[in-house]
Amino acid sequence: MPIGYINEKDENVFGHACREHVAADESVGTNREGKLVDESNHPLPYANVVLLSLPDSAFVSGTISGEDGLFKLEATSVNQIVKISSIGYKTVYKPTTPANMGIVQLVSDARMLGEVVVKANLPVTRIKNDALETNVQGTVLSKAGTAEDVLAHIPGLQKKADGFEVLGKGSPLIYINGRKLRDIAELDQLTSEEIKSVEVVRNPGARYDATVGAVVRIRTVKRQGDGFGVSLRSSYDQSQNSDFVEQADVNYRHNGLDVFAMVRFDKNYLLAKRYSGANGLYRYHMDAKELSAL
């Protein structure tokens, strides 16, 4: 079962919370607060607590629980509901009333990604310097699929139709090994198994431009050994349009040099290549017009 997949039981819980919300009546513009705990009644830190509008479940705002499990956010309309999620736990939906939600207990999700998940395989989130760091390597997140799938389950991040939002800070700049992402589509070209950790910086400071409200830093796993590597990947996406993707990756490593060539066919890119060295991972894309000029 994919991470974040909402099954029929979850939908029933969501519907029940919606009915509770409709039956309730409390003024908006006041803080909604509570405390998250696990099954052992220990505080549950760094869980995503987001406000969704009704009936379309569109993202409104959000926050994360503190190290003590406490959270606080403001409801801006009577037609809203609270969604609480944390990797390894079942998602909880709560009405926005009463304003004080009290203690909210999250229970373990017995199965994720089609595998039994033990606590040792769950990612650990901690404060590191200026960032909230979540380890990915060796955890259930390394099986998520792509970098985009990983970011969708990082504490403090919310997936949106046009990218990601750092809760309470807006759209972030995204970096891979120190290189700024030029296109959100690049996240789909980095597998979850290549990621070592993800850092969410809520207050970038003087290191970044004053207009930057938040930063996401992805660090990749350093490959070991010399030689060639080849991998093939296919994907099909059906929405308003059909999108079929074929991708072939060829990798060569020698004495710390890591050269990666990729041929990718989809509606956006015909050819792309990337290489990485001691200072990080780099990618370059070539669209159909540029390719025809060769």
Image (spheres, rainbow, N blue to C red):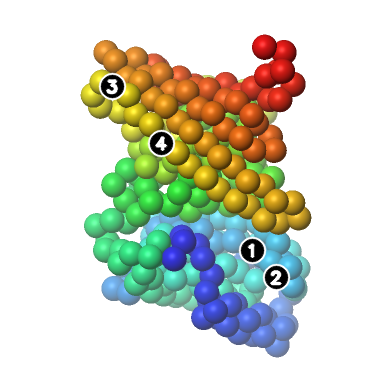
Would you name the residue on which mark 3 appears?
Answer: 227
- Looking at the rendered structure, the secondary structure element under dot 3 is strand
- Looking at the rendered structure, the secondary structure element under dot 4 is strand
Q: Which of 63 and 260 is in front in this view?
A: 260
Question: Disc 1 and disc 2: Cα gap in Å?
Answer: 7 Å
Quick check: can you spot residue 89? yes
- The amino acid marked with disc number 1 is Leu
Disc 1 to disc 2: CB gap under 8 Å: yes
Question: Disc 4 and disc 3: Cα gap in Å?
Answer: 14 Å
Q: Which mark is residue 281?
A: none
- The amino acid marked with disc number 2 is Gln
Disc 4 to disc 3: CB gap under 8 Å: no
Pointer 1 or 2: first along the chain:
1
Pointer 4 or 1: first along the chain:
1
Question: Disc 1 and disc 3: Cα gap in Å?
Answer: 49 Å
In this picture, residue 219 sits left or right of residue 159: left
Would you name the residue on which mark 1 appears?
Answer: 51
Question: Disc 4 and disc 1: Cα gap in Å?
Answer: 40 Å
- Looking at the rendered structure, the secondary structure element under dot 1 is strand
At x 26%, y 63%, the residue is: 118
Question: Disc 2 and disc 3: Cα gap in Å?
Answer: 54 Å
At x 64%, y 85%, the residue is: 20
In the rendered image, residue 191, in percent from the top left (x then y), is placed at 44, 41
Pointer 2 or 3: first along the chain:
2
Would you name the residue on which mark 2 appears?
Answer: 80
In the rendered image, residue 223, in percent from the top left (x then y), is placed at 30, 28
**Quadrant of the rendered structure where residue 194 is?**
top left
